[in-house]
């Protein structure tokens, strides 16, 4: 393994930071499973900002595109190829910018502030049910459902469908984990996309007949105006649902874990609730939920002090970049009042996360209401962490709450 880098090790999920530190100390961009790994903040940022670095393979020609798909085993997946591999996330240049413009008005900070009462009401109702229990799994019983409910409300999906959409998302997105691709996971990803497509087609038909003030209705209007094709509409809605589910659940879990294992910071946040936006920002820096993204060099180019040929694959390790001592003072310290804190948890450049304001809103409301209603929060057993390189966060986080 490159510089001792092995994300399949059992302890990687709970403590990947020593492996990232070794990578950052390795000269250049070392090769790992066909990717050139960028682990230092400066290198990751440079690649993410460079428009010659692309997410998709469309610029490489049909034959080369098929070869690259087969090399990564992203072929023989008709629904996945149609709605995931060609989504806004995987497009570049004018097509990516066109689709992003179509949905951007729904993701401005001003527009999303209108969701704060809905999020607050949902969290309080969940806590009404959970607080009397005294102990519960923060992930399964609270965090797992919140992002799906909120982004579903924004799009217009049935609230009862949120748990199922979360499972479809996990099956779909999980196949992107380069360290965990199997035939079974491939089949599950394809089936999840098919079921997701069918559910969104039903919603499309409903909103076409009876529009509402939601994203699906707005996208139908954009389709009617010729701004995007029907498959692009379905793929874009699907990608927004994918992006808004798992990553927010993961950072909620790692964020609470950071507070629980740094009681001084928890106490300070209780005493100074106005620090909540900064605290959420630090949660994203300290343990980013999405740790690995790829880029292709669309032409011969130079980056990180080396020349690279067209088609070179780069692996951007956002989590490692966010712990780089060259970019952050004392980077392994969790500091809810850290300033400045310009991290890369949401990426950078043309593919910067569209839903970053929504994720922050969910986090701010959840932790504000949790701490307001539970003066005492503690760990209630061992924490199980996600395995692999695609995502970082607890799978289970048992906690106890006390109201007095």
Image: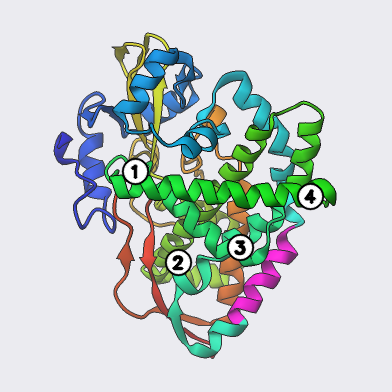
Residue that badge 3 annotates: 161
Quarter of the figure with the N terminus: top left
Range drawn in magenta: 115-127
Specify which label sits upstream in the sequence, 3 or 2: 3
Specify which label sits upstream in the sequence, 2 or 4: 4
Seen at 66% across and 47% down, the residue is 201
Seen at 56% across and 74% down, the residue is 370
User: For the image shown, how many numbered marks are present on the structure?
Assistant: 4
Secondary structure of residue under mark 4 = helix
Specify which label sits upstream in the sequence, 1 or 2: 1
Seen at 76% across and 33% down, the residue is 223
Is residue 175 on the magenta stretch?
no
How much space separates mark 2 and mark 4, taking CA atoms? 38 Å
Of residue 214 and residue 258, the one placed in the foreground of this image is 214
How much space separates mark 1 and mark 3, taking CA atoms? 25 Å
Residue that badge 4 annotates: 207
Kindly indicate the quadrant of the structure image that contains residue 260.
Answer: bottom left
Marking on residue 177 = 1
Give coordinates of residue 151: x percent, y percent. Answer: 64, 55
How much space separates mark 4 and mark 3, taking CA atoms? 16 Å
Residue that badge 2 annotates: 256
Of residue 276 and residue 215, the one placed in the foreground of this image is 215
Quarter of the figure with the C terminus: bottom right
Give coordinates of residue 227: x percent, y percent. Answer: 75, 27
Residue 374 seen: yes
| Front tag of 1 and 4 | 4
Badge 4 vs badge 3, beta-carbon distance below 8 Å = no
Kindly indicate the quadrant of the structure image that contains residue 75.
Answer: top left
How much space separates mark 1 and mark 4, taking CA atoms? 34 Å
Question: Alpha-carbon neighbours of circle 3 within 10 Å: few (<14), some, or many (≥20)?
Answer: few
């Amino acid at each position: 393994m490159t510089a001792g880098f092995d994300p399949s090790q059992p302890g990687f999920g709970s403590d990947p930071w020593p492996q990232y530190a070794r990578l950052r100390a390795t000269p250049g961009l070392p090769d790992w499973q066909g990717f050139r790994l960028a682990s230092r903040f400066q290198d990751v940022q440079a690649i993410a900002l460079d428009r010659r670095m692309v997410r998709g393979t469309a610029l490489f020609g049909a034959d080369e595109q098929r070869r690259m798909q087969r090399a990564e085993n992203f072929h023989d997946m008709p629904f996945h190829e149609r709605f995931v591999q060609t989504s806004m996330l995987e497009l570049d240049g004018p097509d990516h910018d066109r689709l992003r413009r179509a949905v951007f008005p729904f993701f401005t900070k001003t527009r999303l502030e209108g969701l704060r009462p809905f999020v607050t009401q949902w969290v309080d109702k969940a806590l009404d049910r959970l607080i009397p229990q005294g102990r519960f799994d923060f992930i399964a019983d609270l965090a797992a459902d919140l992002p799906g409910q909120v982004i579903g409300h924004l799009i217009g999906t049935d609230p009862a469908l949120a748990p199922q959409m979360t499972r479809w998302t996990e099956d779909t997105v999980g196949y992107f984990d380069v360290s965990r691709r199997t035939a079974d996971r491939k089949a599950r990803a394809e089936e999840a996309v098919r079921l997701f497509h069918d559910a969104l087609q039903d919603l499309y038909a409903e909103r076409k007949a009876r529009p509402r003030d939601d994203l699906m209705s707005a996208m139908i209007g954009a389709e009617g105006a010729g701004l995007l094709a029907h498959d692009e509409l379905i793929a874009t809605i699907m990608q927004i649902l994918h992006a808004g589910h798992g990553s927010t659940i993961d950072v909620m879990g790692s964020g609470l874990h950071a507070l629980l294992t740094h009681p001084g910071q928890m106490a300070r946040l209780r005493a100074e609730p106005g620090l909540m936006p900064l605290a959420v920002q630090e949660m994203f820096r300290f343990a980013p939920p999405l740790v690995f993204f790829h880029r292709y060099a669309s032409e011969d180019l130079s980056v990180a002090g080396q020349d690279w040929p067209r088609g070179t694959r780069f692996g951007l390790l956002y989590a490692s970049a966010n712990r780089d001592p060259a970019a952050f003072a004392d980077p392994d310290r969790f500091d809810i009042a850290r300033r400045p804190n310009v991290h890369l948890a949401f990426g950078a450049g043309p593919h910067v996360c569209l839903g970053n304001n929504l994720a922050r809103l969910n986090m701010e409301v959840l932790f504000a209401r949790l701490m307001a209603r539970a003066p005492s929060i503690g760990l209630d057993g061992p924490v199980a962490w996600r395995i692999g390189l695609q995502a970082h966060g607890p799978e289970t986080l048992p906690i106890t709450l006390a109201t007095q």
